[in-house]
Amino acid sequence: MSMAAIRWISGPVLRATVRGPFFLRECVRVGPRHLLGEVVRIDGDEITVQVYEDTTGLRPGTLIEGEGNPLAIRVGPALLGNIYDGLLRPLTGIDARVTAGARPAPAARLAFRPSRKAGATVRGGESLGEVSLPGRRTLACLVPPDLEGELVAIQEAGEYDDTQPVASVRTADGREVGVAMSHAWPVRVPRPVARRLPTREPLVTGQRILDALFPVALGGKAAIPGGFGTGKTVLLEALAKGCAADVIVYLGCGERGNEMAGVLEELPQLVDPRTERKLMERTVIIANTSNMPVAAREASIYSAITVAEYFRDQGLHVALMADSTSRWAEALREVSGRFGELPGEGGYPAYLSSRLAEFYERAALVETLSGSRGSVTVMGAISPPSGDFSEPVTSHTKRYVRAFWALDVKRAQARFYPAVHPLQSYSEDAAEFAPWWSENGNTQWLELRRRFLTLLDEQSRLERMAKIIGKDALPARQQLTLACADLVNEAFLRQNAFAPKDRVAGPAKQAAMMRITGRFIELSTQAVAAGVAPDRITRLACLRPLARMGEEIGDGEMEKFDAVASALETEFHDLIPAPEARDEAAAAG
Ligand SMILES: Nc1ncnc2c1ncn2[C@@H]1O[C@H](COP(=O)(O)OP(=O)(O)O)[C@@H](O)[C@H]1O
Ligand SMILES: [Mg+2]
């Protein structure tokens, strides 16, 4: 075993003189409390180590032991339903602190039923049998991705500790390797896949403004930049509760404990409307709050994405929410500063950009090693200091994500939620999803999307003009544009995360609301063309039920939308003079 003696200490960073070889990224244990750390630099006979726990009390001369393997976490079915720190050690709740030298989660006792027989050849990523979890759910007992060989022994059906081998595999070079229901994987190494697949399918988020205007791909990546209080956390929580993923990995990274309270207290209570079971049963929460050691925060996003990849390898669709990547970048900055590295832009190390790229690159829709389809979709919040989107974390992230959900201070101040800015946000994949929406009951999706975006764009232009010349001085058609843009905002885009019927909107509800809003725009355009004054349209009685349909009509009440739609038709029918009446009026005039 390699050893080193501490020579210099600065917060979470140590320098030590080595006695025996270490390798870069090797996991180490420091001092009598066995604090967990990682070798981050090697210069001749000196190593630099970042320590993931509180280093108070360490002194020069204290010994560091190499573990002989890179920093790894144990992944397995038992992760579901639990809360961990950034290095995947169990936490019990919001007030839990990780104790120095904490050990990984204890073994979980799970039911295993073999599906393969001794003598078979097995490859990485294949299933050796079924693992049963509470709630009649089953997952696979996966062969670790880097293992291949002959199955020489496999246990019969029964309950086993998930860290204890249930099978034994002989590799080509004659080693016998035990396979348990969980296995270790180095966090900084992406788990291998058979191939990455192109994606023409959105991850339905349940948030109308995102699904309709700025959709994210299944296996895609989205960033949520927004100043303090603009609703990043509430939005990520809404996504965790409502997006159409099989597994949720929620990473609270460097935020204050009370800001994670919603996730830690509420999520475990929630019932998943799709399965009628506790949402938490398909969720893993990783919390590295601001009071926990800063270096562990740096590692936590790798732990989180490794957990997400593990469930992807089970052939599942996984959504990873990270709140916030800025706090992660700050950890990177702090630790790098202590190494004495030359700071770059904003004080961040020069490799900030490549680290962000590596992280987002791990989002994908894939064919797994065993031939099934799985995905990891990443949604990361960014908290730019004073809401300035030109700062390094936002601008670098922008290069790697395909969907950009910019939260706007003005919209948030007006309590217009989700405060996604319709002109600063974008989705580069949107056009790809039209066929998917057509198959899912929204044949007009692309056309209506374009229509709404155009209106919102015109709105901002016209509002500027209206400020100068007054709204009433605008021509009728432009007044109508403003009225329609208001409707798109109020009736369709606004969505209250705390309204029981509206916190999540399924595809059918979204399609109905989009269609009705589109129909209003169509009818009112016809009415104005036929000479109806715009202020008569803005006084229509149907506008109120339209603006309230999101909150008042739930996913299971689609027939109520028909009533809203037919009220709309009737009112416009009464408003627009019949063609003959119009002709007569024209003749009389
Ligand atoms: N979608 C939403 N629906 C209703 N209220 C919201 C929504 N998003 C944000 N809010 C309100 O704004 C407050 C601040 O949001 P939060 O997510 O904590 O901001 P951030 O994480 O960006 O600092 C919340 O406490 C809530 O009152
Ligand atoms: Mg927040």
Image (cartoon, rainbow, N blue to C red):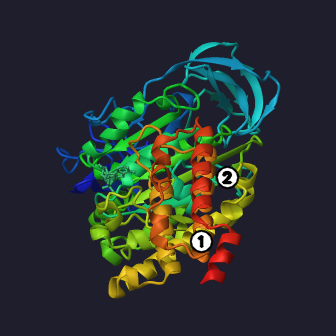
Separation of marks 2 and 1 at Cα, in angstroms? 42 Å
x 38%, y 80%: residue: 471
Q: Position of residue 221 (x, y in %)?
A: 55, 59
Q: Which is more toward the observer, 218 or 252?
A: 218
Q: Position of residue 402 (x, y in %)?
A: 57, 65
Q: How many marks?
A: 2
User: Is residue 298 or residue 214 the one in the foreground?
Assistant: 214
Nearer to us in this view, 496 or 195: 496
Provide residue 232's location: percent of width, then percent of height: 38, 55
Determine the image quadrant of residue 532.
bottom right
Q: Is residue 448 above or below residue 291?
A: below
Q: Amino acid at mark 1?
A: Thr
Would residue 358 be found to the left or right of residue 166 on screen? left
Which badge, 2 or 1, comes first in the chain's sequence?
Answer: 2
Q: Residue furthest bottom?
A: 469
The reply to whether residue 362 is in sight is no
Q: Residues within 10 Å of mark 2 (few under 14, many from 20)?
A: many
Identified by mark 2, the residue type is Leu
Side of 404 relative to 201 (left or right): left
97 over 484 or under it: above or below = above
Answer above or below: position of 493 versus 76: below
Rendered-image quadrant of the C terminus: bottom right
> Is residue 48 or residue 494 the one in the foreground?
494
Q: Residue at x 75, y 58 (%)?
A: 435
Q: Which residue is mark 2?
A: 365
Q: Is residue 370 left or right of residue 190?
A: right
Q: Which residue is mark 1?
A: 525
> x%, y% of residue 328?
37, 57
Q: Secondary structure at mark 1?
A: helix
